[in-house]
Image (cartoon, helix red, strand yellow):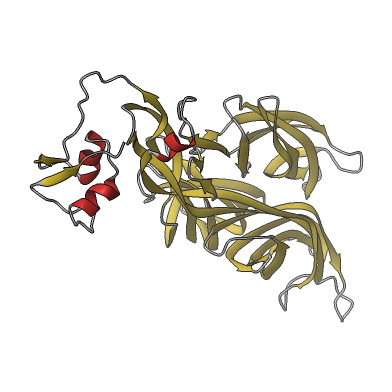
Amino acid sequence: MDYTPDNTIYLRSSEKLQTKNEFSGDFILPDSYEDIRKILYTSASLRPERCEITSGKLANEGRLFYTVLFEDDNGKINSVDFSSDYQMTSNADKCEGKTLIMSSPAVESLVVKLLNPRKVGIRATVDSRCKLWNEGEASMQLPESFNSEDRLSIEKKEENINQICVMTYSDSDREISEDIELDRGAEAIDEILLCNIDINVSDIRRNSDSLTLRGEVDVMTVYRSTEGNIACKNIQLPFSQSIDAPAAPENAEYFANVYIDKKSAVPAENAFGENKMIELDFSYAVSVTALVPAESRVSKDAYSTKFCTENEISMFKYSTPMPSYIYSDSRTVEGDFEGSATCLCVFSDAALKNGDGGGYEALCRFAVLVKNENGTIGIATVNDTFPLDITNGAECIGNIDIRGVQCSADNNKLKITYNFTASAVCWKNVECGYVSKIKLVDNPEEKEYKAITVCYPSADETLWDVAKKYHISENMLMSYNMINDPTEKKNVLLIPKKRG
């Protein structure tokens, strides 16, 4: 972060613009589908397309994707996809100068209703999860009457502050194709009903002008077998991607969001002519945020060795980096369920959210597709919310990654055991005062100092305080009293006569 002797550039602290908007729509079932008898499960994801400030407004735009799993009038399980646009605006008229935007929008809640056998009503709540950093200047203004020599008479006490810069890197329209083989002994696929894809980035490394992202692709495919049974195939694929990142700093904390765009999963024949393969194709976009520690300098005090002056103090806020948070553990959660059943598959998602009483919480949600004793297919939901021990007063961006979900349904209880990892990049907003203006003031009582003045500083007076009181430079005072360290304490100081 660059600065000049009379001008410090800084980043103000982040402003939260966590606008929540509801988007609703009615969707008509295509003619090729049978009427819907019962909705079993609905998933929602989004793909952000634009996030920028225009005319004092922050605009967030993108597309919402829905998948509805349902039972039709013939008792068969099927799924259908819908999509719609979303647009969100937030007031950003306080933003001055260059504004850096960090956005990681997410679907917070989803409500689905069957309006009639061929119409579905969907209401999604989208949290914009935006934070803005305004880049501005903290400069010390001198009176216009000061000439160049007068300006050299200004003594400044400066302080370094540790803050963060924000950088973003993105890449889009990357494609992955993968063939997934069913387990030996599994029934052949008749029709693929649903495919969920989630990319978790666990490692980001800098390589000169690029970033290498590594992690896992979690794929869950629900299908109907040729025997008419509902089955599920879970697989984890390695993920590795490099994106361009010119001038990416080495000491930054990086955080990635990956958004799935188009996806396709179709059955395919294996070497024996059986439909026991899944051809998976999908595209995605990557957005990486870098929080970069940076040291800046501000003027905490100032005076003139030639004139009597007063300081005008201004305040500004800035964000200072804090240690990153990462925590892994396992949990068990139970929910009510009538009777006994077989768990066919578990849909899960998780998010880092603001707690009602402050701090941060993990919200883990599970939807379990179950087969009841009478052979019917149903859905059961369980939520698990718990606090995270993130430093009090900190702000952060982060993710919750769920792994190894196990489920059982018996004796009117649904029991889910799972592993999770919570990770977050953190910072704290603090306020700082700086000298924004020096004013000349009259001091008719000022007297000409003698050749040598003896000063007995009080216990709390520093060398800076004494030099300021007698309008001499701190360096001159140290030199005259043979002091090498400005923090050194002396009971008696000799004050030289001011140079005219």
- The location of residue 15, given as percent across then percent down, is 52, 34
Q: Residue furthest right?
A: 31
Residue at x-position 33% and y-position 26%: 310
Name the one closer to the observer, 278 or 92: 92
Name the side, left or right, on which 436 lies relative to 198: left
Residue at x-position 44% and y-position 57%: 324
Name the one closer to the observer, 115 or 250: 250
On the image, which quarter does residue 304 sit in?
top left
Which corner quadrant holds the C terminus?
top left
Judge whether 474 appears above or below 197 on screen: above
Q: Is residue 118 among what the camera can see?
A: no
Name the side, left or right, on which 295 lies relative to 465: right
Name the side, left or right, on which 223 lies relative to 472: right
- The location of residue 448, given as percent across then percent down, is 21, 30
Name the one closer to the observer, 252 or 8: 8
Q: Residue furthest bottom?
A: 271
On the image, which quarter does residue 181 sit in?
bottom right
- The location of residue 357, given as percent across then percent down, is 37, 35
Judge whether 115 appears above or below 64 on screen: above
Residue at x-position 49% and y-position 54%: 293
Task: Give the total of numbered labels.
Answer: 0
Q: Is residue 377 among what the camera can see?
A: yes
Residue at x-position 35% and y-position 44%: 392
- The location of residue 235, given as percent across then percent down, is 67, 68
